[in-house]
Image (cartoon, rainbow, N blue to C red):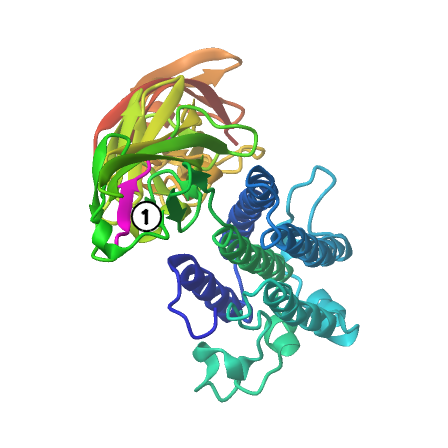
């Protein structure tokens, strides 16, 4: 929102945009391209969560207005929320279409649906598609017309002060490039798409989708917060509760005024809510404020109905009267957002680093975690948690904030993938097992255990393996001639084993054990049955 203090999510979106924009022009390696794929996967998951949340918010607005008697002042807000959802869906689908067109034109995915690194590096298709064919300019116009469209919808229901900045910016409008002479005069299209690899542009489009959904979420929340309160009458004199909103996320503050309608300040009322005393200000308003605890269950809209029961005691006509008041409100189920490179499954006995957030709680988020079937290490920042699962089963992570339980997330425990055995010569070169090797080249031979690539990338602190058990044999006509035990793949008794070797012999490594060093420095041995043969010439 223009002119307002940025929320943590807005700051995150801005930083992600700057990072993606800065990386677009780089000559990227396969490792960086894989990071782009991971970033894109994370943003697409976030988009799905956003869409589900925003759809539920629209449903909640309609439901709340109906329950409050379809007041004239609130009915237009239902239509406005539906228009916001429709406008968002249109621009989101447009961006998704552009992204899929880029994937098809660049052959970024193979027949199995996996990204192809070689094609993700292509920088010509992006420039041709977005600059030469004008898709970039079209995207810029649509992205920047969207905030204006949303502002117009909000203005129609009295929320014209809520405004949003343009999404697609030229270099001169981005702080990172203000002092960059080479980039500061570049348009949105040339900055983002000329000489930009396909993988980076895919991630960038997903980021734009997230920005659109974030604007939608802020807009729907603003609409939801303006929906009026329930009022309950007792005879002629009224007791009332007026809340800031009757839909409150679990773990956040419920705030409301409690008062007597048409009363004077001389009435000096006393008030209670659910049996608890309520502070009354000099104007006769009782200030209700408490932290909303999570519900035991929620309906299909993610809401749980609760009722406040209050009493106002005041003197009317020389007689103390008790005025009852009931107020219905709804507890919204907070969404637990988990970010991690390992995502769907956690590796057994490894340091799985997670970021667990509850966006609805904002700055009030003070997380505490419980972990079953594993251990955990709390990070230095709120929400950072390293989970070390047990050997198998599921890990259950309980999330609380300020002493209130928010919910739980479950993950399957994935076993550590077995390493691959790789013989290397004394100079570090891998031995080509398809070719016969000279005896002299194998005198300084080592046998390494290399971690599976994905595990090595995402769990580097836990991906150190070494061969610690097995046997190596020199075979001649399939009959063993020499045998030696293996206690370390880095120290093999090759000289004694090969002193009688002849052309046509076969050197066989039978590995029975590898040892992994985990993030704590602990040695974890495991069985491994692999055989590696090398022919001798």
Q: From the viewer's perspective, is 512 left or right of 204?
A: left
Q: From the viewer's perspective, is 295 left or right of 76?
A: left
Q: Nearer the viewer, residue 485 or 185?
A: 185
Q: Which residue is mark 1?
A: 259
Residue shown at the point (60%, 45%) measured from the top left: 58
Q: Nearer the viewer, residue 316 or 437?
A: 316
Residue shown at the point (40%, 27%) measured from the top left: 416
Q: From the viewer's perspective, is 393 left or right of 204?
A: left
383 versus 434 height, above or below: below
Q: Nearer the viewer, residue 140 or 251?
A: 251
Residue shown at the point (57%, 76%) measured from the top left: 169
166 drawn magenta: no
The percent position of residue 319, horizontal first and vertical second, equals 23, 38
Q: Nearer the viewer, residue 417 or 55?
A: 55
292 drawn magenta: yes
The percent position of residue 165, horizontal first and vertical second, equals 53, 72
Question: Badge 1 local density, few (<14 within 10 Å), some, or many (20+)?
Answer: many
393 versus 82 height, above or below: above
Q: Quadrant of residue 269?
A: top left
The percent position of residue 448, horizontal first and vertical second, equals 38, 34
Observer able to see residue 518: no
The percent position of residue 233, horizontal first and vertical second, equals 44, 39
Residue extent of the magenta highlight: 284-294
């Amino acid at each position: 929102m223009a002119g307002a203090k940025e929320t943590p999510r807005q700051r995150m979106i801005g930083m992600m945009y700057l990072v993606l924009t800065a990386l677009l022009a780089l000559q990227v390696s396969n490792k960086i391209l894989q990071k782009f794929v991971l970033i894109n996967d994370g943003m697409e998951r976030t988009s799905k969560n956003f869409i589900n949340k925003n759809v539920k918010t629209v449903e909640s607005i309609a439901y709340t207005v109906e329950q409050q008697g379809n007041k004239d002042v609130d009915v237009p807000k239902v239509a406005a929320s539906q228009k916001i959802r429709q406008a968002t869906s249109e621009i989101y689908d447009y961006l998704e279409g552009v992204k899929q067109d880029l994937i098809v034109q660049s052959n970024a995915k193979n027949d199995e649906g996996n990204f192809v690194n070689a094609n993700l590096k292509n920088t010509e298709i992006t420039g041709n598609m977005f600059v030469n064919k004008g898709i970039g300019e079209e995207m810029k116009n649509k992205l920047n017309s969207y905030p204006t469209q949303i502002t117009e919808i909000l203005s129609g229901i009295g929320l014209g002060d809520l405004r949003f900045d343009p999404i697609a910016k030229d270099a001169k409008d981005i702080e990172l490039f203000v002092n960059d002479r080479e980039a500061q005069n570049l348009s949105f299209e040339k900055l983002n798409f000329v000489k930009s690899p396909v993988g980076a542009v895919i991630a960038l489009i997903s980021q734009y989708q997230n920005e659109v959904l974030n604007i939608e979420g802020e807009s729907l929340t603003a609409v939801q917060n303006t929906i009026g309160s329930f009022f309950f009458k007792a005879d002629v004199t009224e007791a009332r509760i007026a809340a800031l909103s009757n839909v409150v996320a679990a773990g956040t503050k419920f705030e409301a005024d409690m008062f007597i309608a048409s009363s004077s300040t001389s009435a000096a009322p006393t008030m209670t809510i659910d049996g608890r005393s309520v502070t009354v200000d000099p104007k006769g308003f009782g200030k209700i404020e408490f932290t909303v605890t999570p519900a035991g269950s929620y309906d299909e809209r993610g809401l749980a109905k609760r009722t406040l029961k209050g009493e106002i005691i005041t003197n009317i006509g020389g007689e103390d009267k008790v005025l009852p008041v009931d107020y219905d409100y709804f507890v919204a189920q907070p969404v637990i957002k988990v970010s991690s490179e390992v995502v769907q499954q956690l590796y057994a006995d490894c340091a799985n680093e997670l970021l667990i957030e509850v966006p609805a709680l904002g700055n009030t988020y003070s997380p505490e975690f419980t972990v079953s079937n594993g251990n955990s290490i709390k990070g230095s920042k709120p929400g950072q948690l390293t989970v070390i699962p047990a050997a198998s089963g599921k890990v259950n992570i309980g999330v609380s904030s300020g002493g209130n339980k928010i919910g739980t997330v479950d993950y399957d425990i994935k076993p550590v993938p077995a390493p691959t055995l790789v013989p290397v010569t004394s100079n570090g070169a891998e031995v080509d097992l398809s070719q016969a090797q000279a005896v002299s080249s194998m005198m300084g031979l080592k046998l390494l255990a290399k971690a599976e690539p994905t595990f090595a990338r995402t769990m580097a602190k836990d991906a150190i393996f070494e061969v610690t058990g097995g046997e190596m044999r020199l075979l001649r006509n399939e009959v063993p001639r020499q045998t030696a035990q293996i206690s370390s793949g880095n120290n093999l008794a090759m000289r004694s084993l090969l002193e009688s070797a002849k052309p046509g012999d076969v050197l066989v490594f039978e590995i029975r054990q590898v040892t992994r060093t985990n993030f704590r420095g602990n040695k974890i041995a495991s069985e491994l049955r692999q055989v590696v043969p090398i022919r001798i010439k």
